[in-house]
Image (spheres, rainbow, N blue to C red):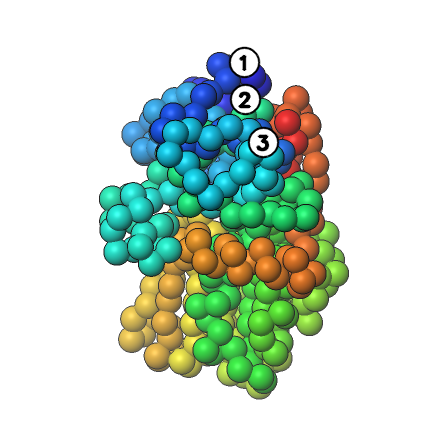
Amino acid sequence: MKALQYRTIGARPELVEVEKPAPGPSEVLLRVTAAGACHSDEFIMGASAEDYYFKPLPLTLGHEVAGVVEEVGAGVHGVEVGESVLVYGPWGCGRCYACASGEEQNCEQGMRAPGIFSDGGMAEYMIVDDARHLVPLGDLDPVQNVSLTDAGLTPYRAVKSALPRLTPGTTAVVIGSGGLGHVAIQILKALSQATVVVLDVAEDKLALAREVGADHTFVSDTDAIGSVKDLTRGLGADVVLDFVGIQPTADLAAGMVRVGGQVVVVGVASGAVRIGQTTVPLDVTGRAINWGSRTELMEVVELAKRGAITIHVEEFPLDRATEAYDRLHAGQVRGRAVIVP
């Protein structure tokens, strides 16, 4: 079968022929119907040999996966051959306290996410380690909704964690209206009555933000701090969600959050907000989001079924998957790039 693999440190991914896998006991074989390309994949492929701590190469990419159950191994119950499903990505041990709570992304033994720590879904077929990691997709289109598993789930957890601060009359700032950010805007509008302000460096991304519900948009530069302060009577934003995660956006977040506000960092990069008595307004809290729980993915799917969130996708066949990553790397994808085997 065909698979898109990262094979050499520092190189771009390659489309190769590999052996079709067979499910062992407790495993499920999926025929992949869609797989999302993510900036996290770029982070993995950008790591040096010294900093690379993911699955030993070669690594089949793809941690956002939808598929149809093709075959089940011995002892598998609760799923049927032919069922359309999403794959919950943060695979944990299933036994520790975090996993028992559905918080497998925080597994005490460390998670084994496909496309990161095990082979993923950028292939014609994929092995899922346990049926509990499958969420029914129902009648939802897998191509349009495969990215619910990360681009939907991660911003949902970020917004949900900040909801106590997002009462009517408050302001939420989203930095970065890309694959995750444009979904966060919709989640904010669905779950709160907060005013939603979006920052980005690209006008097409700001246009997308307005299209999906942003109340105000500004270019993401140092002037944005004053713009947000002007909107909020000089107070600043109640919640700032940083979907970029580089130091300039972290500095923006620190500069525009209000007293008692919250900064939520989602973007996978090296930026950091220094929280201390003299670095941010008093009583500011910070949080770094790590994916989301299994129950939260179920909630995200329900939002999609109700039409509350729609992920904008650009579709690529598997034969053009390397092109999708080149465009993602260049910042030329509007919404989410989705690979269809």
| Quarter of the picture holding the C terminus | top right
Give the mark toward the camera: 3 or 1. 3
Mark identifier at residue 32: 3
| Depth order, front residue of 290/93 | 93
Q: CA distance from mark 3 to mark 1?
A: 16 Å
Q: CA distance from mark 1 to mark 2?
A: 6 Å
What residue do we see at 33% from left, 44% from top? 92
Above or below — where is 261 with respect to 263? below
Closer to the chain start, of discs 1 and 2, is 2
**Total numbered circles:** 3
In the rendered view, does 58 fall on the left or right side of 53? right
Give the SS element for disc 3: strand
What residue do we see at 51% from left, 28% from top? 71
Give the SS element for disc 1: strand
In the rendered view, does 115 fall on the left or right side of 286? right
Cβ–Cβ under 8 Å for marks 1 and 2: yes
Residue 184: x %, y % from top left = 58, 61
Closer to the chain start, of discs 3 and 2, is 2
Figure quadrant of residue 300: bottom right
Q: CA distance from mark 3 to mark 2?
A: 11 Å
What residue do we see at 32% from left, 52% from top? 99
Above or below — where is 177 with respect to 45? below
Given the image, on which type of amino acid does mark 2 rest? Ala
| Depth order, front residue of 95/91 | 95
What residue do we see at 41% from left, 36% from top? 76
Figure quadrant of residue 142: top right
Residue beneath disc 2: 3
Residue 215: x %, y % from top left = 69, 72
Give the SS element for disc 2: strand
Mark identifier at residue 17: 1
